[in-house]
Image (cartoon, rainbow, N blue to C red):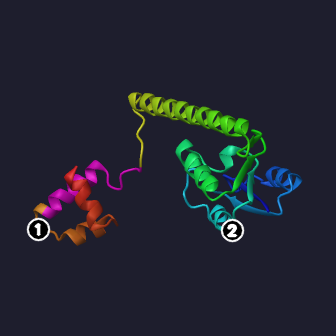
Amino acid sequence: MKYGYARVSTGDQSPALQLTALKRDGCKTIFKDEGLSGATTKRPALGRCLKRLQPGDTLTVWKLDRLGRSLRDLITMLDSLRDRKIKFRSLTEAIDTETPTGRAMWQMIGVLAELERSLIAERTSAGRQEARRRGVKFGRKAKLSPAQVAKARKLIEHGEPVDDVAALWNVSRATLYRALAS
């Protein structure tokens, strides 16, 4: 039996193109995850699909990156499918693991996809470093200003209970202690 799997990363993306291609390829049952990044390990429809597959079945995806983001994840998944005697097809890349050419093509595309992700990560990291150099602050805004921390320190030194000082600025004791420690 032919099964299809479709995934879109955000809620405003439509899986229609993938679903049409999978149906045209003859997939009788199609599983789809919507609003889930490929990087996440929680893809419930993919999990249900993998459990349903039996020896001799074929799992088809519209594009290789719909199945997973990392080369290691893809290799592990496809090795598992092969061990279970389940065929795999990727329509966009024309990969069919039943043929030697398809297996070689899958490996080459996987390597190139991994390279692309690595380059994106490098550019993102370089952008963050440049932003830091320019003085851009990352992370959440501090709940207490330096003046509030100084005032809290004085109140505690003068015997005010920590709970009362924390309540004064509507923060938890842990937040107050972290602010005092920095």
Q: Is residue 162 above or below residue 93?
A: below
Q: Is residue 37 visible?
A: no
Q: Quadrant of residue 178?
A: bottom left
Task: Name the residue rendered at 69%, 59% in the picture.
Answer: 34
Total labels: the figure holds 2
Task: Name the residue rendered at 68%, 64% in the picture.
Answer: 49
Which element type, helix, strand or loop, lies under badge 2? helix
Task: Name the residue rendered at 63%, 53% in the picture.
Answer: 82
Query: Mark 2 — residue?
Result: 52
Query: Mark 1 — residue?
Result: 159
In the rendered structure, does residue 40 fall within the stretch colored magenta? no
In the rendered structure, does residue 145 fall within the stretch colored magenta? yes
- Name the dominant secondary structure of the magenta segment: helix
Ranked by sequence position, the earlier of labels 1 and 2 is 2
* Residue found farthest to the right: 24
Q: Which residues are magenta?
A: 140-156
Which element type, helix, strand or loop, lies under badge 1? loop
Task: Name the residue rendered at 83%, 50% in the picture.
Answer: 17
Q: In the rendered structure, which amino acid carries the disc numbered 1?
A: Gly
Q: Nearer the viewer, residue 68 or 139?
A: 68
Q: Is residue 173 above or below residue 69?
A: below
Q: In the rendered structure, which amino acid carries the disc numbered 2?
A: Arg
